[in-house]
Amino acid sequence: MPKDPLKSPQLYINRELSWLEFNQRVLDEGLSDELPLLERLKFFAIVSSNLDEFFLVRVAGLMRRRAAKVRRRDVSGMTPAEQIDAISLRVHKMYAQLAEGIRGVLEKLARHGLVIWQRNNWTEEHRQFLKSYFTREIMPILTPLAIEELDPRPLLPGLQMHLAAVIAPCPPPDGPQPRDDPAEKIVVVPIPTQLSRFIALPSENNLHLAWLEEVIAANLSALFPGCEVLSSAAFRIARDADVELHDDEVENLLSEMEKAVFARRRRAAVRLSITSRPDPRLKQWLMRWLNLGEESVYELDILNAAALMELVNRGGFDDLKLDDWPPQQPRDLIGEDDLWQAVQDHDVMLFHPYESFDPVVRLLEQAAEDPQVLAIKQTLYRTSGDSPIVRALGRAAQNGKEVTALVELKARFDEARNINWARRLEDAGVHVIYGIAGYKTHAKALLIVRRQDQHIHRYVHLSTGNYNDRTAKLYSDVGLLTCDRDFATDVAAFFNLLTASSESVGWSKLAIAPTGLKQRFLDLIDREVQVSTPDRPGLIMAKTNSLQDPEICRALFRASKAGVKIMLNVRGICCLRPGIPGVSENIEVRSIIDRFLEHSRIFYFRNGGHEEVYLSSADWMQRNLSRRLEILFPVIDPNLRRRLINILETCFADNVKARRLFPDGSYELVSRNGPKIRAQQKFYQEALTAVREASHAEPQFRPLTSPKE
């Protein structure tokens, strides 16, 4: 038992197992009969994609530590080896549930005319059509590899689908060839990534499809004239993809990051996925070749279920999808034609995706063309494939404005895209910065400097989410537009910190990680303890993606022991065990999984009646608070504060999509007592109501006055 009882492993949930419980909640949405069939497939696809990334990064790190014989236990008391074993058991169970769920949905889709034919059910007409299609469209781009005979052995890219086959010379006419003949060999056929995972079969009215890998497997013999294909199996390899780059030790970060991303292709394998019930010869050969144990092998009915998203995104079958919820005009900008003037008049809150992200894009596009705009500074962590944000920054630079963009090259799995954006921006004349050595820049900040009325005005946008016009339609985030001088001064100092390696300043409004943001959170939690009384106990409400930082957990434990009520809405990882008598009985943790990804970070402190609300780019994770550049900022406007408090209260009132965390680490749907409250639906209805009421409001008559001198 540790000297500090609040460090006891019994109080904590293992981070990796907690993340798997999050993915289970995503899977549970797909298993729910309350959702339309194609929406269920969407959640199944997300589960598969999530597991891929989990193995590429988290499991890869554990396997490296196990190989190095690291036995250090995590906060929950588990060694790397113990975690790998526990993960294997949990994920095998999850994949079995996923397969059963997909089978059930595909059976129901068939009744609606969307049929995926399994190879053993193909008709003779199907076989003839697919043979012709294979010969014409697929075979010319396939490249079979006799891997054992090639030196050096070719590299098989991670996550790409492949077919492995056992082939042998056709038996002589006078008798069968023994099955263990040494002439047998194993070959691998990479399945090109540019091909659709589904091939359409002839059908007059319905949509009939075949799996690409089954079509190739059925026609493999065409690739090996004179040989017999004895067996085949599709497989995918997951490789260690965690780029470890000590950027304080390299001279050219852009070049080194490009090398690191390319090097992922040669990293060690961490998982083998293979079709169910494969030929043992193929399975054992792949295990030996990849140096993987049985716990790292997953036999699956459907490899890479993320491809099901192709079906979701196909046209038609709209009755099997949810109705669209198009983003509405932001409440604080209804009736405002001049963005510059609106932000000068009052702080503007943007609540995505219920409210449109368009004002942020529009502000940048106007700034790019506005002759009064002198400078633009912005952080870019993740952007869309054809980002209007990046295009606007490039045009602004070409129009002679001073434009600075911090492009975070180490945004995991977006490195290649960000490298491309960095080069494009540099070509356009933008000053591109790659952050501060040793840290990821995860803060979301925009500063526009504009001359008007003979004075310099600074416009600031801060947010909990990325400058990504696409994910802004899928992720729930909150942004703030303001001209507040203290905010502007702090944000300008923050950019100077990034671009000039200047010393950290005394901040007026902002708290910055890694220098003071964690301590600010700890002070706020401790202050809640100090002002809490039996008659008016303290209250902390927080909405975050993850809670893992041990110091934050212990501070919350201390607050709970002191009688402070703590209401946490944590979408994903939560390492804190709530409801433990004498320690965390005043802590309740809930998680919402719904049509939009909960991504905002909102923090409320009752503060003895002097309520304070903060927004942040940072989760309560050790990496965010200690190894990243993050921003925490207060919401000053009382009306916006009240809106944010209502958001927190509504999330905690959700009894449709919310699940509650129990001390054993399990989650259960919140019991439906009273009227049904679904937070995301309520938020969208409120956005619709605000626009509807504004359209019926009495017109406002404002007299024109002479221009200011």
Image (cartoon, grey):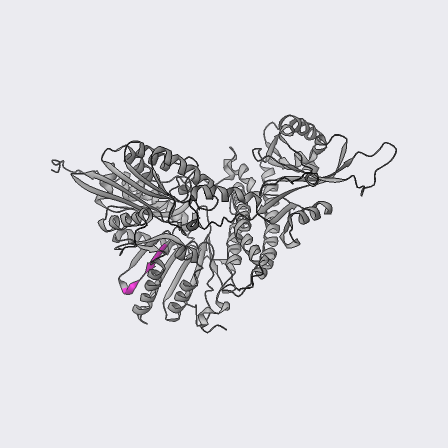
The front one of 345 and 204 is 345
**Residue at 38% in and 54% down:** 650
Residue 600 position within the rendered picture, expressed as x and y whole percent measured from the top left? 39, 50
**Residue at 39% in and 34% down:** 424
**Is residue 338 visible from the viewing direction of this image?**
no
Residue 273 position within the rendered picture, expressed as x and y whole percent measured from the top left? 62, 46
Is residue 99 one of those drawn in magenta?
A: no
**Is residue 457 visible from the viewing direction of this image?**
yes
The front one of 246 and 669 is 246
Residue 562 appears left or right of 121:
left
Q: Which residues make up the magenta segment?
A: 602-608
State which quarter of the image contains the C terminus: top left
**Residue at 68% in and 49% down:** 288
Residue 495 position within the rendered picture, expressed as x and y whole percent measured from the top left? 31, 47
The vertical placement of 633 against 275, above or below, is below
The front one of 149 and 109 is 149
In the picture, residue 167 is in which quadrant?
top right
Residue 150 appears left or right of 112:
right
The vertical placement of 137 against 96, above or below, is above
